[in-house]
Amino acid sequence: MVERRRFGDVIPHLILLIGIAIVAFPVYLCFVGSTLDQATIANGQMGLTPGPLFFETYWRTLFVGTSGTTREPVATMMFNSFVMALVIALGKIAISIISSYAVVYFKFPFRMAAFWMIFVTLMLPVEVRIYPTYKIAADLNLLNSYAGLTLPLIASATATLFFRQFFMTIPDELIEASKLDGAGPFRFFKDTVLPLSRTNIAALFVILFIYGWNQYLWPILITTHDDMQTIVIGIKKMIVTADALTEWNVVMATAMLAMLPPVAVVVLMQRWFVKGLVETEK
Amino acid sequence: MASVTLQDVRKVYAGGVEAVKGVSLDIPNGSFTVLLGPSGCGKSTLLRMIAGLEAITSGTVSIAGKVVNEVEPAERDIAMVFQNYALYPHMSVYDNMAYGLRNRGTAKEEIEKRVAEAAKLLAIGDFLKRKPRELSGGQRQRVAMGRAIVREPQAFLFDEPLSNLDAKLRVQMRIEIRRLHNRLKATSIFVTHDQIEAMTMADSIVVMNGGRVEQTGAPNHVYRFPATRFVATFIGSPAMNLLPGRIAGPGEAEIAGGGRIAFDPNAFDVTPGREVEIGIRPEDLRLAGSGEGALTFKKDFAEELGATRLFHGTVGEGAVVVALSGPAPAGDSFGLSAAPDAVHLFDPASGDSLRRA
Ligand SMILES: Nc1ncnc2c1ncn2[C@@H]1O[C@H](COP(=O)(O)OP(=O)(O)OP(=O)(O)O)[C@@H](O)[C@H]1O
Ligand SMILES: [Mg+2]
């Protein structure tokens, strides 16, 4: 038995290790690249051990920027990306939780029509409606602003559906008990629905933050000023066609930095997440 | 505390189901009234209309003499205990009880005082900081009652609050609820489909069937003088035996192929020759003495219950259950009789009791 169990453990672990290696190795290479100087990388002399320029490269990347391509330090880009991702995630959650609440708990004319209209927008992600959306944003003077960067991405059918499904699992008796306890629709939302949705909100926040952070097409259209660049666009701009002119060490440092906030969100929220899951477990 | 009066209350659901078909009730101040009936008879619907959770199609509901048809649930000043307790899962026991008072703007000291009193009364003082999921079923039940008590409402409404508990706890809680009622003397309306619960707890039982009230009265009265065949068979366990028969003479009825039995001629409005349905409770049947007009019972099998023995068999064509204590009668067939005032007569067509008003 012991033999067999050990053997049984080895194979899955091996597979997992290989998987991790496949994912982690390029990231490691990227890190190594970010600690070398540009010439070493360009000449193809990059090894597997980090070089001596860690602090120098990251300092330059964060606070000085590349000499020609982006003209803004990465710190600015990170700030822009962070604002964008945060506003999109919070905005999506706020709007969709309110609209699901309306659709699930209120009887009003064309309630189902409203629900289906939200549902249909699943088929209209920003890529599909990009021209009209751009036109509207431009007409509203939203170019090169945080509002323009975030507002058009906020309406979210997915999150609305997600909350609707969750609300439908809240027992009717809880609403009735609230009614008898003198809680109106607003109190019921604030005192019962919102606290019960905590874990769902946390899960959704992780997904939506990463969604916002990774936005590429929309920011590239809506921002033209250097100081409004997001980090994803920054990386793209740093890579110029002539290989020799690309500051690969800075590119790689930027890529490393771009990874940090989503990772941080996942790690931080995961704790919260598990706590929440354990708490609501019945 | 207040009386609750229903006048010709009807409920037709959106789909066209007529769940309550005209119910008039007078629930006096301070009484413990049980709405009893089989599943789907409209008990919950009726209770929810009193609570204000369901719109009233027609008729009026009054609390303390005031028509409340258009009054919001929160303003009706009633408290409800739900079948699944409906405690707020994210709030502590204390907050669950305090929530309704806070929403009404009760002063903090007053809330603390009332919660402490209720907690003491219900012996849940040790759990005030816990969340509902950290409690057992019986404790949750108590918290749900505590939430109702702290409100000091005009009336308590209970919708099958004991049906999620195991048999032993159910017995214990029903005693506790009744004891609580004796103490608080608050008008209570309790919905159940369990006739034992109804018999043991009620001051007054309202037996419902198919959206209508079949009979209202004290448990003992409803048990002894059932107004309809439905009430007769629904109350009492095992159910009352019903046998088709005919009035043979004054104070005597005959069961086709089964013998004769005496009934109280003054209690019933019948003439000889009339077809009737004869009802006798299993516990009212006894072994017939010699020379007594008796029913011939053919035994099929017996169930041992300890204090009594249940004999299943037939009298004439009809199935009959008899509960007997004492030594088992010998043989597969024996004579049965019953006290004349334990014999009920019903109209075979309408099922109404033929008892004189
Ligand atoms: N929301 C609703 N829409 C349509 N019909 C309903 C609705 N709620 C209940 N009914 C119907 O009304 C009738 C009475 O229901 P009700 O819940 O009052 O029964 P009950 O006596 O409480 O039964 P139980 O003991 O099973 O709880 C049933 O036939 C039920 O199907
Ligand atoms: Mg019910």
Image (cartoon, rainbow, N blue to C red):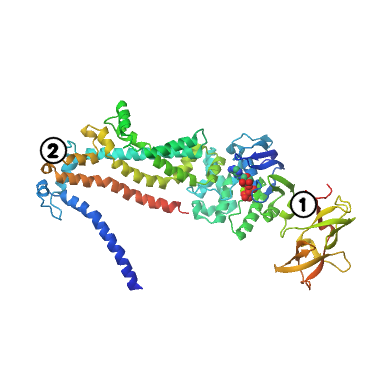
Of the residues shown, which amino acid type is indicated by label 1?
Pro
Number of labels in the image equals 2
Residue A258 x/y as whole percent? 24, 44
Q: In the rendered view of the protein, which quadrant contains the N terminus of chain B?
A: top right
Q: Give the camera-side residue of B123 and A114.
A: A114
Task: Report whether residue A167 is seen.
Answer: yes
Where residue B296 sits: x, y (%)? 82, 66
| Chain ID at mark 1 | B
Q: Chain of mark 2?
A: A
B74 lies left or right of B314? left
Q: Which residue is mark 2?
A: A67
Q: Which residue is mark 1?
A: B226
* Residue A87 left/right relative to B161: left
A161 over B199 or under it: above or below: above
Q: Is ligand 1 closer than 8 angstroms to the Cβ of mark 2?
A: no
Quick check: B295 above or below B221? below
